[in-house]
Amino acid sequence: MGTLHDDVVIIRPSEKEGDPSVITVNCPDKTGLGSDLCRILLFFGLSIVRGDVSTDGKWCYIVFWVVCKPATRWELLKKRLVQACPSCSSASGISYYRSELQSPKPPDVFLIKLCCVDRKGLLHDVTQVLSSLELNIQKVKVSTTPDGTVVDLFFITDTRELLHTKNRQEETYKALEDVMQDAMISFNIEKVGPEITACCQASPYLPSAITDDIFNLEMSNDLPSVSLTSNNVCVTMDNSLSPAHTLVQIVCQDHKGLLYDIMRTLKDYNIQISYGRFYIKQGRKCEIDLFIMQSDGKKIVDPSKQTALSSRLKMELLQPLRVTVVSRGPDTELLVANPVELSSKGRPLVFYDITLALKMLNTCIFSAEIGRHMIRNREWEVYRILLDEGASSSIPRPKVEEEVWKRLMGWE
C-alpha cells in the first residue's frame, strides 16, 4: 500500500460569511471517485455551488466550492474524503468500477433496541443523534403501542467501526439519553449475525400496488406539482468538439445532491470524466459541462448508448427520489424510494430529511420501515411510513407530499 500525501485533501474554510469554502482533492484517479466524494459532502450537509475536475487518466485534480453549516466538522470531513481517495500506489493505472470484482468485507451490523414514551419529533431526534455519531441506519422498524409506547429497532453500521467497544456504546447511549431525557424507558445494543439480519430482511420484491403508487409517474407524461422547479432538464451530447471525448452538457435547476445524482449515474454506467465544470447561476440554474469516455477509453458514438445515458440522466435529475402519499383504508402512508448505486450505496440522510419534514408539519409517525427491494430490475431503498391517524387527517395529503419533497430537494 502506498502512503497518501498530506495534501491529498486541502480544505480552506471561507473567511467571510456567505462566501463558499474551497475543498481541493489531488489523488490517483478511479471511476466513481467523483460520486464517492459528492456523497460524503452531501452526508456532511454541504451544498456544492461550483466544481472543477480534470484527470489525465491516472491522476485527478478536483476542486469544490461549497456552502456549509456553521458547525461543519472539518477535520472529520477531511478524514472521510481522504479515506475515499485511492492510495498513491494506484496511480500506475486507472481503476474502473466493476461490481462483480468489488467484494469488500461487509461491515458488522448492530441492533439498537430502544423503548420510549412517544412524542412529536421523537424519531427525527433519534435519527439526528445517530447521524451525528456516523451510525448508518440500514433498516428500521418502528411501532407504537396503544398506550403510547414506542419500540424502535435500528439495524446500523458504524462508519468508525468501533461500535463493538464499550466506550462507543456508552457514547451512543449518552447521546440518545441527552436528547430523549425522561422519555427513554430502555436501551440495548448488540451485534447481530447474518442469520438475524437475514430473518429481518425485507422481501426483495414489493407488492405491485406499492410499486405502482411509487412509480406511476414513469408511465405518464405528467410530473407532480411538487416537482415544479425540477421539470426543466436539458441533456445534450456532442462528439465534434474533442477527438477523444464525448461532451455532455446539462442545464437544469439546482437541488440538494444534484452533482451526486449526476456522478452516481455516470459511475453506474462505468463512465470516466476527463474534464468537468459545474456552477450555479442566478435563480438556482445549473450548467454542467463534462468531457467523458467509456471504460474502453473511447467516446460514446453509438446512438442507442447516447440515448440510454441521456434518458437516464434526465430521469435522475427530474426525480432523484420518488415521493407519494397514499391511503391504506383508514390509514395514510408516506412512500419514499431512493435508488441504490451498483456499489450498494444509497443516498445519505434520506430518513433524516423525511422525519424532519414530518416534525416541521407537527405530524406523528405511527410506524416506519426501511427496506431494499428490486423494482423493475433495479434496487431501491424504500421508506414506508404510516402516519398517525389523528395528526395526518388534519393535513392534506398533497401538503405532506410537497413538504417532504421540498426537504429532500433542499428547497425548504
Image: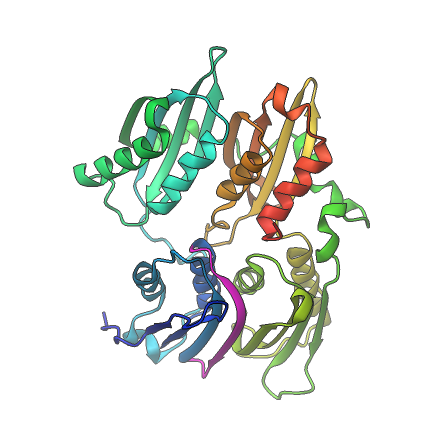
Quadrant placement of the N terminus: bottom left
Q: Taking 160 as reference, is 38 above or below it?
A: below
Over which residues does the magenta segment extend? 44-57
* Residue situated in front as seen by the camera: 312 or 157: 157
Indicate left or right for 361 with 7 as reference: right
Q: Taking 221 as reference, is 276 above or below it?
A: below
Q: State the residue at coordinates (17%, 36%).
A: 166
Q: Taking 139 as reference, is 96 above or below it?
A: below
Outermost residue on the left side: it is: 166
Q: State the residue at coordinates (34%, 78%).
A: 91
Outermost residue on the top side: it is: 147
Indicate left or right for 89 with 29 as reference: left
- Residue 313: percent from left, percent from top: 65, 62
- In terms of secondary structure, what is the magenta stretch mainly? strand
Is-magenta flag for residue 49?
A: yes
Q: State the residue at coordinates (45%, 80%).
A: 57
